[in-house]
Image (cartoon, rainbow, N blue to C red):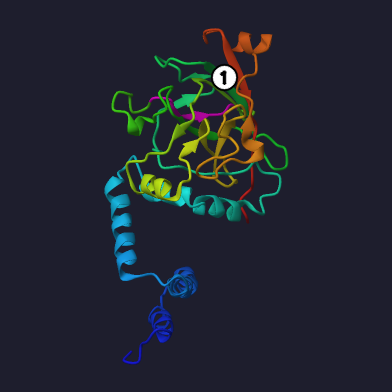
Amino acid sequence: MRDIDYMTITDAVVSAYADTPNERLREILGALIPRLHDLIRDIELTPAEWRMTMDFLLQAAKASSDQRNDFILLSDLLGVSAVVDLVDGRDDDGATSATLLGPFYVPGQPDMTSGADLIKDNPGERLVVQGQVLSANGSPLPHAVLEIWQNAPNGLYTAQDPDQPEDNLRCTLRADAEGKYSFATVKPQSYKVREDGAGGKLVKASSWHSWRPAHIHFIISADGHKRHVTQIFDAADPYVDKDAVFGVRADLVKPFDQAPTDADKANFPDVQSPFNVVNVDWVLAPTNG
């Protein structure tokens, strides 16, 4: 490696990793290294800018914890997460759109049955969310599992707010034998992504905004089907067409202001009126093989 120069460095590094035992990792490194090197040459990245980039990534690491991942936030803000989801779902014919996991997912939330009440002591407009989990062929998926989380009326997730219980507005819900599910909650709020870490610095430096439209997160699992990571968005939210992290998809935009029918009122007698209803069915793609 004595003859490394401005151009030969790339071949030298690619060659060094050419015997990587894991085939997929070898493929990724073989594509990533030349692209990174070409980018640096194209933009003529300076040593000072390289040091700033390393410090920037260190800030993301320092801001991250078990309940907050600033690297996911950076991925979201740069549209990387969205591209990954779109690539993964491009052949899922008939399935509901998948979208971003976000930085505040915490597994292992309390198990609840369909019809659960998540409202508890939370103020705000009350919502009932209901629908059915289906396969792409239209058949119901009995006992599908829905992991659900959202922010509180103050705009904060539990990981951001020590005054909220750890399981506030979160649950693991099991659909019934027909794949039907429902739960009562409060209307989520649009909010700014956190600006006290690396993601905030990126947004401020670029003059892009940091607002996300109001949404509720879901991870939906059923035997024989792909794990489905997605969200629903309030159609009336002012940021629904300019999401800071590019997560909105047309089929995930739902009216959050639908009045309940008489049947809805009868099905949810314990939910204090007035409340609105969000109807959303989930269609999952079967796994291959």
Q: How crowded is mark 1: few (under 14 residues within 10 Å), some or many (20 or more)?
A: many
Read off the residue under disc 1.
Answer: 128
Kindly indicate the quadrant of the structure image that contains residue 225. top right
Looking at this view, is 73 or 275 the one in front?
A: 73
The residue positioned 43% from the left and 29% from the top of the image is 151
In this rendering, is residue 8 above or below 221?
A: below
Kind of element beneath mark 1: strand
Q: Can residue 231 be seen in this view?
A: yes
Q: Which residue lies furthest to the right in this view?
A: 137
Please provide percent x and percent y for residue 96: 65, 41
The residue positioned 35% from the left and 70% from the top of the image is 46
Please provide percent x and percent y for residue 236: 61, 26
Q: Can residue 132 be seen in this view?
A: no
In this rendering, is residue 33 above or below 178?
A: below
Looking at this view, is 152 or 136 the one in front?
A: 152
Please provide percent x and percent y for residue 269: 56, 7
Is 279 colored magenta in this rendering?
no
Q: What stretch is highlighted in magenta?
A: 168-176
In this rendering, is residue 30 above or below 269?
A: below
Please provide percent x and percent y for residue 74: 42, 50
Label 1 amino acid?
Val
